[in-house]
Image (spheres, rainbow, N blue to C red):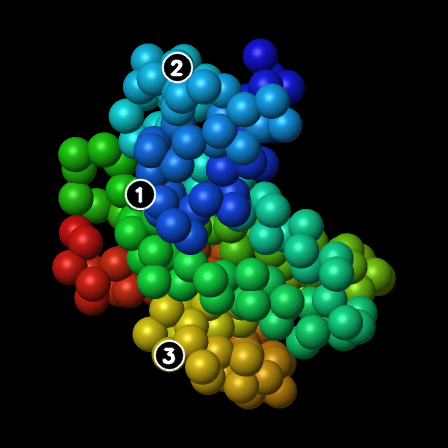
Amino acid sequence: MAGVRTRLLQLTLPLVRSHGFTRHALAQSVLALPAPHPEPLSDTAVSALFGEGDEARRTLIEAWLDEGRKQMRHAPSRSIKDVLAARLRYNESVVDLLPEAFATLVTPEGIPFVDPRPALSHAAKVADEACNVVNDQSVGPSWYARRTSIAAIYTAAELHQLTSPKTAEDFLSSLLESSTKVESAVSEASQFTDYIAKSWAGIIKSRGII
């Protein structure tokens, strides 16, 4: 079952552009199998494989985020700028769909408040992957400071991308140039958590999603 689920999630990713982060996209995945299924998955089958209700959408969004981190490994160079820019470019084809997708991740079903944990996890995983790709050798407090800074910078650039896609990479560059200031601003775990939570809540509310 796990193998089938993983395979269908991979087949769904190219469908997000046309069908969104939806249960319908997941249902259509079987039509892309080498030996295509004669019809889309039933809603019952989607629930069994990927989760009930919006849980299936969250499963798809998480799979899409996982693939985005893999794409960072194909950056044109091993500079932190190119690696983070590669991750931003992965967003470009679905940037108009991301506010609602992010809202689905951080808003418990039926409750209008933001749970920052998925946002923090996303930022931390991007930062960790970026440091792995560039072979960052930081240890001890420097290891934490470096990843916190990169997570904050990437989050700011990604949220900027949602409102101004064409200037996202330039904005990323400007933030990296002042990374020491960013490290200082988010050096405490509580400050970092508060920054991420408020940033995601702000962009989601600005779109009238919650």
| Whether residue 6 can be seen here | no
Query: On the image, numbered disc 2 is attached to which residue?
Result: 45
Query: On the image, numbered disc 1 is attached to which residue?
Result: 104
Mark 1 to mark 2: distance in Å?
Answer: 21 Å
Is 19 placed above or below 194 here? Answer: above
Is 159 placed above or below 43 here? Answer: below
Q: Quadrant of the N terminus?
A: top right
Query: On the image, numbered disc 3 is attached to which residue?
Result: 164
Q: Nearer the viewer, mark 3 or mark 2?
A: 2
Kind of residue sitting beneath label 2? Ala
Residue contact between numbered discs 3 and 1, judged by CB atoms under 8 Å: no
Which residue appears at 33% of the width and 13% of the height? Answer: 44
Residue 28, percent from left and from top = 42, 31
> Which of marks 2 and 3 precedes in the sequence?
2
* Secondary structure beneath label 3: loop
Q: Nearer the viewer, residue 73 or 124?
A: 73
Is 144 placed above or below 48 here? Answer: below
> Which of marks 2 and 1 precedes in the sequence?
2
**Around disc 3, counting alpha carbons within 10 Å, would you say few (fewer than 14), some (14 to 19), or many (20 or more)?**
few
Kind of residue sitting beneath label 1? Thr
* Secondary structure beneath label 1: helix
Q: Nearer the viewer, mark 1 or mark 2?
A: 2
Which residue appears at 42% of the width and 76% of the height? Answer: 165
Mark 3 to mark 1: distance in Å?
Answer: 21 Å
Mark 3 to mark 2: distance in Å?
Answer: 38 Å
**Around disc 2, counting alpha carbons within 10 Å, would you say few (fewer than 14), some (14 to 19), or many (20 or more)?**
some
Residue 57, percent from left and from top = 37, 35
